[in-house]
Image (cartoon, rainbow, N blue to C red):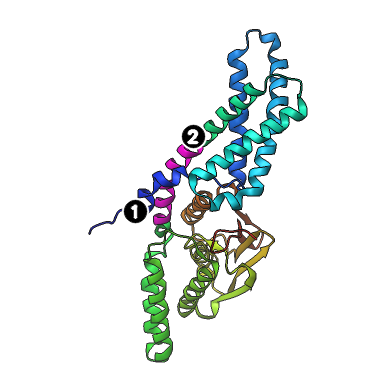
């Protein structure tokens, strides 16, 4: 088998030159920490008397924090425009914003100070340092992101699912040939989606449809024991999410919450859009502890890592085990097909 070159790996160098998303919380926190860290290092290097270090640090904070916060705020506001510019023009504009914020803060806070050239010099140095950091950061993570997209297949349907589904089809083949035919079509759709390249974000509506096919097939095997309660907000359908975000979690809910039991159980799936975020909750009943099937948390860890790679600090995955149900909650930013925000 010949494996084609991963285009995301091939484009790592180009992606490393792109501007970061200045509306991403993780990016903003990194900028603040990096610039303040550089400023502290500069103070420590030029300090000749430890007794004066506190005053020098305070003076540094007064000179750095205002232009830094102002720069970050302006970059946050103009991020949509920056994203549409060529890479070089975007970096030049971002650098101009930093120098402009430095000039404005110097005129506002220290108009009589003759240290403007030095302030502009250090602002330029800090800008280059931040740019170099994000270039290296993205260059290091683009291969990991591409690999994570490929490893979406590690959150795949368990191998026994195919055999269980085929057995379910055989069970209804004579009694209900039409249902058996539909089940085979659903199975083909599911595995067709599974074997796709799966390197890009997909509409949440597609993920929901995939889960519906999966649950329909599981219904052949589990019958009335499997009950599904959907609460779905159509406003969230257009959100772009990592492929196979929902199906492994729903499969976990069936495997751990329905299969071990002897009576009917309900898997609840709630999807809602709340402002700029999409909230997803999947809940399953807790069976008797004596028959509960152990889990290795591979699906949860896989999805949590992919959310981190795609959204940085803007997405979260939490779990909660209550007295009668186990819940998985995901919160991620709403982004439409163009990567935009509401």
Which region shows up in magenta?
Answer: 134-151
Task: Say which residue label 2 marks.
Answer: 132
Q: In the rendered view, does 296 fall on the left or right side of 197?
A: right
Q: How many marks?
A: 2
User: In whole angstroms, how far apart are the C-alphas of marks 2 and 1?
Assistant: 25 Å
| Occupied quadrant, residue 22 | top right
The tag on residue 6 is: 1
Determine whether the residue tagged by mark 2 lies in a helix, strand or loop.
Answer: helix
- Residue 129 x %, y %: 53, 31
Q: Can residue 264 be seen in this view?
A: no
- Percent of width and height locating residue 134: 50, 39
> Residue visible at 37% across and 78% down?
167
Compare residues 66 and 324 and report the one nearer the observer.
66
Q: Is residue 140 magenta?
A: yes
Relative image position of residue 96 (x, y in whole percent): 60, 37
Question: Which secondary structure class fits the magenta region best?
Answer: helix
Q: Earlier in the sequence, mark 2 or mark 1?
A: 1
Q: Is residue 35 above or below residue 227?
A: above
Q: Does the magenta stretch include residue 317?
A: no
Circles 2, 1 touching at the beta carbon (< 8 Å) = no
Circle 1: is it few (<14), some (14-19), or many (20+) Cα within 10 Å?
Answer: few
- Horizontal and vertical percent for residue 294? 49, 57
Element type at mark 1: loop
Which quarter of the picture shows residue 154?
bottom left
Q: Dot 2, crowdedness within 10 Å: few (<14), some or many (≥20)?
A: few
């Amino acid at each position: 088998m010949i494996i084609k070159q991963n285009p995301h790996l091939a484009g790592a160098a180009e992606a490393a030159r792109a501007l970061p998303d200045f509306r991403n919380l993780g990016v903003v926190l990194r900028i603040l920490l990096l610039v303040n860290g550089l400023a502290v290092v500069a103070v420590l290097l030029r300090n000749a008397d430890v007794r004066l270090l506190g005053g020098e640090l305070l003076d540094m904070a007064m000179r750095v924090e205002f232009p830094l916060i102002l720069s970050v705020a302006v970059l946050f506001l103009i991020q949509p425009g920056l994203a549409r510019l060529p890479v070089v023009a975007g970096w030049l504009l971002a650098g101009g914003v930093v120098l402009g914020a430095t000039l404005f803060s110097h005129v506002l806070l220290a108009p009589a100070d003759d240290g403007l050239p030095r302030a502009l010099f250090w602002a330029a140095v800090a800008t280059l340092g931040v740019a170099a950091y994000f270039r290296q950061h993205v260059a290091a993570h683009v291969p990991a992101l591409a690999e994570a997209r490929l490893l979406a297949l590690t959150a795949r349907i368990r191998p026994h699912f195919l055999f269980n589904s085929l057995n379910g089809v055989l069970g209804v083949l004579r009694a209900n040939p039409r249902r058996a035919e539909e089940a085979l079509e659903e199975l083909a759709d599911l595995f067709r989606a599974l074997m796709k390249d799966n390197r890009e974000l997909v509409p949440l509506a597609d993920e929901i449809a995939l889960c519906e096919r999966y649950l329909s097939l599981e219904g052949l095997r589990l019958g009335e024991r499997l009950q599904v309660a959907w609460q779905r907000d159509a406003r969230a359908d257009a959100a772009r999410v990592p492929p196979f975000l929902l199906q492994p979690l729903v499969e976990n809910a069936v495997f751990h919450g329905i299969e071990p039991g002897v009576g009917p159980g309900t898997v609840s799936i709630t999807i809602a859009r709340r402002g700029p975020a999409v909230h997803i909750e999947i809940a399953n009943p807790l069976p008797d502890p004596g028959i509960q099937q152990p889990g290795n948390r591979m699906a949860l860890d896989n999805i949590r890592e992919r959310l981190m790679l795609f959204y940085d600090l803007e997405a979260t995955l939490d779990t909660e085990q209550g007295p009668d149900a186990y819940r998985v909650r995901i919160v991620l930013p709403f982004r439409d097909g163009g990567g935009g925000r509401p």
